[in-house]
Amino acid sequence: MLRYDEADLIAYVAEHCSGVALALYDTTDQAAGVAALQGAVRAVGRIPHPDDPEDPLPSWCTVLLEDAVPVFRLDLKDESQYAEHVVRIVLDELDAADIDGRLEPKRPAQPPYDHDAQADIFYGTATGLTELDGGLPPRFPASFPIPQEATLVLAQQARDGTWEHAAWRRSGRPFIEYPQQLRTFGCELGSVAAAEVADYVDTTCMVRYSLGRGRDRGSVSLYHEMRKPGQQPSNWYVSVVWQTATDLPPPLPEKTSAPTSAADRGLDPARVRELVPAFAGLEHIVSCETLLAINAASLAVNAVASALPPQCHHERNFPLWQHGQLAPLLRGLSPDQMTVVRHACLTTISNWTYHRIARLPRLPLARDDAGYLFATDARHAAAPTLQPEQILETETLYALQTAAIMLDPLLESLRTTIADPLTQLLGQLVTHDDGRPLEELVRGPDADRSELVAEAERAGIVQGSASTMSAAPILVRLTRAGTHQVNTAMRQRAGQLSRTLEGITPEQLTDARDACWQIASNRPTSPAAP
């Protein structure tokens, strides 16, 4: 006699309709049981799909022997309303064949750890382990360091068996001491590409290091449960991937901030004034200077921020901690100067969104009593822990970082075009109709300068004056084609600049430019390594 709980089977199939597994246990005639279940497979395959009656309902339906037990496997394409019908077909086939035994869902065995789906950062690429060796996956080295006061919540291996993964959970505090435990064990920690954890940073504050010990390789990730902005985490995780005896190269060194040079701080303001005419015209010198100053200031902010030790930005005191680290960059600026920097950065972003110059997320912006823009989400996040003057400083830093990210295409074009030797050459000629001596043009070795001019001459955009006197300087001037090329490019760039800076007065542009250069000059020459 076949034993079963029909209500339980129906509930199970409805809940697991895309991955049904019904096992036939303790049957005295396994071959007959398999034949009866195969009959059910054929019957279920004849059910038409509700959206396309010419197609069968199931995506997949078969009978497998798993651990010497017949298992009816089925994928119903999320059509849970057919659960009762499917269960009735299976039971009728088994009853008609007079099959005995016990039919019930095949549920996986309880894993040897406290499973926590929040820790599973390799979902779909790894399978759970059913056996451990000393509380660790079998291929982990003997005496591998286990995090303190932690619970094992995952033990997995890659589907191809090349690596194993273990994750632990702890409540109340992050695993900041664990990297040092790994170093003490003999592991070498290195950096990983930012793209590896980019999808996790906003919600889990993930930090990842590569690992190496002898020929073994792996990684360690430190993170917390997924949280939205403003939600503090309560559970923290550390995850280790381990691969034994590989031929992979050793880890890259951990990232540190090298000493900076003047070149890292952006273009020199005086140099910009000389080169901008060929980029957008004389009337846009201040506009270009301001954008390049914003870029230089944002580079300073990002350089200091990237050198800071990892910190969870969901913590209540994170704005206060971050402010203490970054506020020295604003040294010497008045509240009015910071306000105009914030306003200029956010206005450029708003203009790009409004004019659809690029597809950008729309920031939540508002105006203060004086009409200056501020980001409402940044103010809301900072308000609980910061004083009013600290809020302004934080908003200014946030606006600089946001503008640098969102306006990167324009800033990159501005940086690279102005730094381009040909643009430098044209910029020094566009305001000199009578030409300029070759020696006064693009800085660099004489051979490089002469070759650049020669290439421009071959392209027909400049010409050098012929002289029979060896002591007379060679004058270089723009040709008509060169002047047309410069003017066409200037009109296009000038239009983009006008739309980008629309609504910012000339006085505000000048003030923002000067303040941003001050921020850039406050950048430490050698930020502390994390």
Image (cartoon, rainbow, N blue to C red):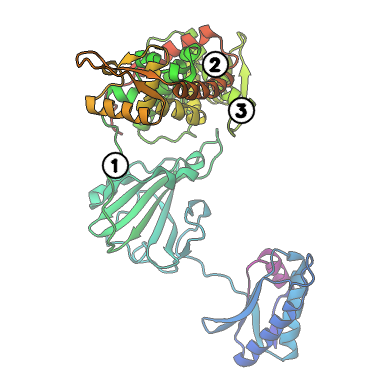
SS category of the residue bearing label 2: helix
User: Rounded to the nearest whole Å, what is the CA distance between mark 3 and mark 2?
Assistant: 15 Å
Question: Of label 1 and label 2, which has the lower sequence position?
Answer: 1
Q: Is residue 62 above or below residue 406?
A: below
Q: Nearer the viewer, residue 273 or 501?
A: 273
Residue 500: where, in percent of width, then height? Answer: 56, 21
Seen from this angle, which residue lies furthest front?
468
What range of the chain is rendered magenta? 7-21
In the rendered image, which residue does mark 1 sit on?
254
In the rendered image, which residue does mark 3 sit on?
353
User: Rounded to the nearest whole Å, what is the CA distance between mark 3 and mark 1?
Assistant: 37 Å
Nearer to us: label 1 or label 2: 2
Q: Is residue 255 above or below residue 404?
A: below
Q: Amino acid at mark 2?
A: His
Q: Amino acid at mark 1?
A: Glu
Q: Residues within 10 Å of mark 2 (few under 14, many from 20)?
A: many
Question: Of label 3 and label 2, which has the lower sequence position?
Answer: 2
Residue 247: where, in percent of width, then height? Answer: 27, 61
Q: Quadrant of residue 470?
A: top left
